[in-house]
Image (cartoon, helix red, strand yellow):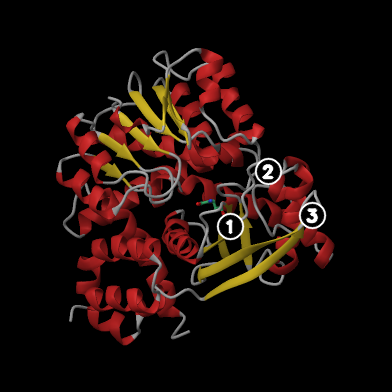
Amino acid sequence: MNYVDEILQRVKEQNPAQPEFHQTVEEVLESLRPVIDRNEEAYRRNAILERMTAPDRAIQFRVAWVDDQGQAQVNYGYRVQFNGAIGPYKGGLRFHPSVNMSIMKFLGFEQTFKNSLTSLPMGGAKGGSDFDPRGKSDREVMRFCQAFMDELYKYVGADMDVPAGDIGVGAREVGYLFGQYKRLTSRYEGMITGKGMSYGGSLIRPEATGFGAVYYVNEMLKSFGDSIEGKTFAVSGFGNVAWGTVQKVTELGGKVVTISGPDGYIYDEDGINTEEKINFMLEMRASGRDKVQDYADKFGVPFFPGQKPWGVKADILMPCATQNEIKMPEAEQIVANGTKYYVEVANMPTTNDAMAYLKKNGVIVAPSKAVNAGGVAVSGLEMSQNSMRYNWTAEEVDAKLKQIMKNIYWNSFNAAKEYGMEGDLVAGANIAGFQKVVDAMMAQGVV
Ligand code: 2IT
C-alpha cells in the first residue's frame, strides 16, 4: 500500500472517534504526496510519518474548582505536545465546551507546521479545557485558571512548553494563569505569551493574528497584480482575530461589511470602518454575551439570525471564527457568487470536501496555517524579548511581523512551484512547514 494511505488508515485506527484529527492529517498528507513519493524510502525507514502523526505526549487531567454558589465543578484539562523537533512546544489554550482530545490533537498537529512556517524556533502544541467561560464571574474564571495551572505547571516552562491564548483565553485568563504558575514555581519567566504589557507582554501581540493575516493577503494580492484598496471583505467571528483583521483591512483601504457570532451575522453596508465601530467589537467580547446582534442594535444595520455571512457577495472572504464553518453548501454558494479569494484565518474553517470544491472551481484559497501564523510569530517575538529582558517598540515588532508574513507567503508559493503545483498555496504551506520539521527529525535520530 502507498505510504500516505497506510498512515491515514493507521491514524484512524489508532485514534478512533477523533474526526477533526483525522481531517487535518488527511488534508496535510494528501498535499504532501509528491514530497513523500520523492523521499519514500528514507521516510519509511525512519518512520517519519508515523512519528509526525503521533503526539510526543498528550496529557489529560481533571480540573476541580468551586463556583460562586459553593458548588464543586469538574472540567477536563488538556495539553497536547505534538512535535518538539524545532524548538520548545508552543501553542494556545482554548476554553470552550467543544474542546475534546480530537480538537486538541487537530490544533496541535496544525500548530507544528504553522510554527515551522514562521521560521522561529517553536515546536507545536495545543491545550485547553471544555470549561465554558460564558456567564462565569471574574472570580470563577480566576479560580478555574488557578485550578487548571495547578496541574499544567508540571509540563510547561520557558524552555519546555509555552502556552498562549486561543478561543476563550484572552489577556485576563493569561494573567491568572501566569500568576498561578509564578506562585507554584517561584519562577518569573516567559512561560506563557499574550501577557499584559506591565508583566512581560509584547506590543502588537493582541493585533498580531489579524494584522498578520492582512499582511499575507496584501502580499498575495500583489503577486496576482491586485490590491486591498477598494475591495469588499466578508469576515466571520467578532473576537480578537476578527478585530485585528477589520482594523488592518480598513487601514489599507478595504471595506469589511460583515462580522458574525453564534447568534447570526450583521451586514454593515458602509463598512465596519470607524474607531467607534471597531472598538465596539472589543466591548461585545468583554461583555461575555457572545452576541453579535448587539452591533446591529447599536448601529442600526441588518442582523441575520442563525445565519453565516457566506451568501454575501464580497471580493474576499475571511472566516475568523472556528473550525468547519464552511462545508459543501457554503462552498457552493461561494463559487456561485463568483468570489475570487477565500482566506482561512480561523484554524481549519473549511471541511476537506469544501476546500477541494473551492480549489477545483478556481477560487484562490489561502490556508489558515500560513495566514494566521502572525499570532504565534509575535508570541515567538514575545519569547525573544522575555529572554533578552528587553522590549521592542510597536514599530519594531510590526516590521518583523510584516517580514515574517511576506516570507511565509513566498516560501509557500515557491514550495508549491518546486513540486509542480504552482499557485496551490495550501500545498505550498504544508510542504514548506513539513520540510523543516523533517530535516530536524532526521538530524536528531529516532526519538
Ligand atoms: O492558533 C494559534 O496559532 C494560536 N492560538 C496562538 C498560539 C500562540 O502560541 O500564540
* Viewport quadrant of the N terminus: bottom left
Kind of residue sitting beneath label 1: Asp
Q: Residue tagged by mark 2? A: 171
Is 218 placed above or below 114 here? above
User: Ligand 1: does it lie within 8 Å of the C-beta at label 3?
Assistant: no
Q: Return the x and y of residue 337 as percentages of the image width and height.
A: 21, 29
User: Ligand 1: does it lie within 8 Å of the C-beta at label 1?
Assistant: no
Callout 1–callout 2 Cβ contact below 8 Å: no
Q: With 304 as the anchor, is 199 left or right in this view? A: right
Q: Can you tell which mark lies on residue 130? A: 1
Kind of residue sitting beneath label 3: Gly
User: Ligand 1: does it lie within 8 Å of the C-beta at label 2?
Assistant: no
Looking at the image, can residue 36 be seen?
Answer: yes
Callout 2–callout 3 Cβ contact below 8 Å: no
Q: Residue tagged by mark 3? A: 179
Q: With 35 as the anchor, is 142 left or right in this view? A: right
- Quadrant position of residue 358: top left
Looking at the image, can residue 156 be seen?
Answer: no
Q: CA distance from mark 1 to mark 3?
A: 22 Å
Nearest the camera: 317 or 66?
A: 66
Which residue is located at x 33 percent, y 33 percent? Answer: 317
